Amino acid sequence: MARRGSAEQDVLNMIMNAGENGVLQSEIWKVTSADSREGSRAILRLEKKKLIERRKELFDGRWTYRILVKRKIPKIDTIVTIPCAFCDLENRCSQSGLISPAKCDKLTIWLKNLAITIT
Ligand code: SF4
């Protein structure tokens, strides 16, 4: 049996990769390491965390759920403007240093603007 977090991550990755149309719940078991029982539990946990949404759908005469990711997926063009890419301080910046991402105003402002554009 896969670890709980692992099944959740696998399922979430699959749903995110499916794009805006989402994926039928029955398709998830075919491409993830989760079996239907552990996958169903992972989906319920992801829904409880408000990361995904389930919509009831009739498919091939049977009721199932279409699973959609609730957050928009960032694309590469949303991060090409990251200030770190063109920062003069980049070679002196580290997690534990005097100059760090946690204390950086440029990065904070950029992240806030990114959050506004993708929500
Ligand atoms: S976190 Fe700030 S200081 Fe560090 S590299 Fe990025 S922009 Fe530069």
Image: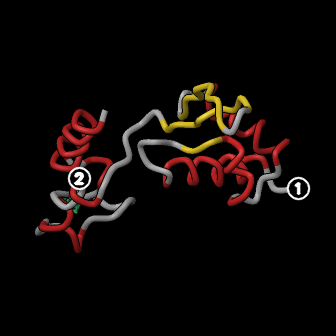
User: Whole-percent x and y of residue 40?
Assistant: 76, 38
Residue at image position (33%, 50%) is 74
Q: Secondary structure at mark 1?
A: loop
Residue occupied by mark 2:
78
- Report the front residue among 84 and 11: 11
How many marks on residues? 2
User: Whole-percent x and y of residue 2?
Assistant: 82, 56
Q: Quadrant of the N terminus?
A: bottom right
Disc 2 crowd rating (10 Å Cα; few below 14, some 14-19, many 20+) is few
Q: Quadrant of residue 118?
A: top left
Which residue is the extreme one toward the right?
1
Chain-order first, disc 2 or disc 1: 1
User: Whole-percent x and y of residue 37?
Assistant: 85, 42
Specify the amino acid type for callout 1: Met
Specify the amino acid type for callout 2: Thr
- Report the front residue among 39 and 55: 55
Q: Secondary structure at mark 2?
A: helix
- Report the front residue among 109 and 94: 109
